[in-house]
Amino acid sequence: MADRRSDVLVLGSGIAGLSAALGAARNGASVTLATKATQPEGASTWWAQGGIAVARTAPDQFKRDIDAASSGTSDPEALDVLVQNADAAVRDVLIETLGVDFDTGGNGASFDFGREAAHSEDRILHVDASTGRHIHEPFLSYLADHDRVEICGDMAAIELLEHDERVHGAVLESDGTVQPHYAGATVLATGGIGALYSRSTNPAGSTGDGIAMAHRAGAATADMEFVQFHPTVCVADGDPFLVSEAVRGEGAVLRDAEGGRFMPAVHEDAELAPRDVVARAVEQEHHRTGRVVLAEHFLCGGVDVDTYGRASLGRLYAVGECARTGVHGANRLASTSLLEGLVWGLRAGTDAAGHEPTEREGAVSTSPGSAPSEEFLKASYERLQRTMDEHVGLRRTPEGLAQALGELPTLKAEVDVHAGREAPRAVHELRSACTVAGLIVEAAAANDISVGCHYVTGTAEDASAMAR
Ligand SMILES: Cc1cc2nc3c(=O)[nH]c(=O)nc-3n(C[C@H](O)[C@H](O)[C@H](O)COP(=O)(O)OP(=O)(O)OC[C@H]3O[C@@H](n4cnc5c(N)ncnc54)[C@H](O)[C@@H]3O)c2cc1C
């Protein structure tokens, strides 16, 4: 396995982890980047289509658009950080360091800024309809050649090394071998939670590991009830395929089975309304046609962090989709996730540099664990996904959430029996998925106000709103 010590340990190789590694290495730190991905496609970043938004000459309007999409729930301080750093970070890292060749208007003089749903300006940089891979692949290559960065693929973090409210690294597993890696600071960048639902746009392996590890170590999470479902996903041969909002931004419309548009009656911006609004309208339509389906797409909440990605435990950072920065509030605006990962990744990595690693293990489990059967793993995922699909999806009810609250602990307890240092990676992933599902359900059950992605009917609040 890799060297067992480094100044900064980054977990995850999407845009957030790569940006954190770059920030830390630029600041003089030795960096180990461990990722369970075996190929670039293992990160959502690679799959991003529409692009990355920048502020251009209208930063205040950009902030207003993000805040409006979130129904006024974005954190103003986080918005300032995102928007003030957006253009400089994109220029510095993506254009000047990596040489990403964003599409131009045709004459090569100016970028072809696109527009997507709920954006009031043309501000999205893109490369064809496959922006993610055009950022991700050069980023990986650049860091692979960097003197102070070591990238370890097919290596999963399974537990944080926490002692006295400070994180000293993580337990890493590679090819069945498990050992601690000590670090001056640890950056979680483990991405999304698609595996909790039967349909997701995320790549396989999106089991919320970073959030689960942080929670077990005692770090705070926030906004976990805000799970975003993408409104325009087609299913071909069983695989969900996302039809990007850029397509609607270019003028595509949504039609019902009879060929009529249904969005103008739902929202004044019709097909360009915020994602949560379009998702609920499409879901209603889906009941009639069965053509366009919804899929879990993005978690707005996560490990609670400040404007430098610092979590509530010492020397622990979280960036990208596994973090809750406050930018997205209750609902994310399209094409702001890559940007958030880039901006927070750089800030966290820079801040994380400068600490010597110390060998403190903390109270990490020493039980060996066991390998359950394939049938157990499959059946457990089916139970988890059925519960999340039925009760913790786009529309929720207090009764459904109560049922999920009853079912999930039983499943988690059955999975926990197998968890231990020597257990196969699949057990740790399933355990993470169950842990994060529990956090989502608890947060959803504790919030009876419908806002953004959290839409709950049948509450006292709902009844009084109907009466009004
Ligand atoms: C189909 C699709 C289209 C999208 N389009 C856009 C778009 O146009 N614009 C936009 O802004 N956003 C878009 N998004 C959202 C955006 O791509 C993601 O939110 C963002 O890329 C997340 O970046 P990340 O670095 O946080 O996580 P990811 O890119 O998902 O990377 C997570 C990494 O962590 C690794 N990992 C996970 N667990 C562990 C562990 N235990 N140990 C070690 N490594 C681990 C994974 O292998 C992976 O390498 C899209 C998402 C999808 C799925």
Image (cartoon, rainbow, N blue to C red):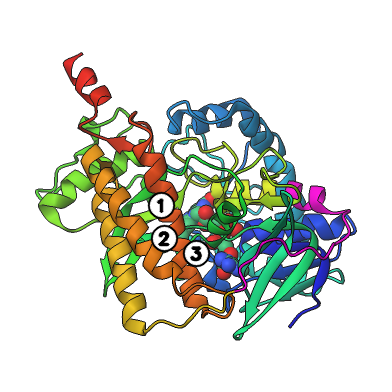
Name the residue: 82% across, 70% down: 5
**Magenta region, residue range:** 346-366
Q: What residue type is labelled 3?
A: Trp
Q: Distance between the residues labelled 1 and 3?
A: 27 Å
Is 75 above or below relative to 7?
A: above
Membership of 362 in magenta stretch: yes
Please provide percent x and percent y for residue 273. 35, 35
Dominant secondary-structure state across the stretch colored magenta: loop
Q: Can residue 37 be seen in this view?
A: yes
Q: From the viewer's perspective, is the residue at label 2 or at label 3 nearer?
A: 2
Q: What residue type is labelled 1?
A: Gly
Name the residue: 38% across, 51% down: 247
Q: Are marks 2 and 1 in contact (CB under 8 Å)?
A: yes
Tell me the number on the disc at residue 434.
2
Frontmost residue, 274 versus 410: 410
Please provide percent x and percent y for residue 95. 72, 55
Q: In this view, does 206 lie to the left or right of 103?
A: left
Is 341 above or below relative to 366?
A: above
Q: In the rendered image, which quarter contains the N terminus?
A: bottom right
From the image, tell me which residue sits under label 3. 47
Q: Are marks 1 and 3 in contact (CB under 8 Å)?
A: no
Tell me the number on the disc at residue 378.
none
The quarter of the rendering in which ligand 1 is drawn is bottom right
Q: Which amino acid does label 2 sit on?
A: Cys
* SS for callout 2: helix
Q: In the rendered image, which quarter contains the C terminus?
A: top left
Does the beta carbon at disc 3 come under 8 Å from ligand 1?
A: yes
Q: In which quarter of the image is residue 461?
A: top left
From the image, tell me which residue sits under label 1. 438
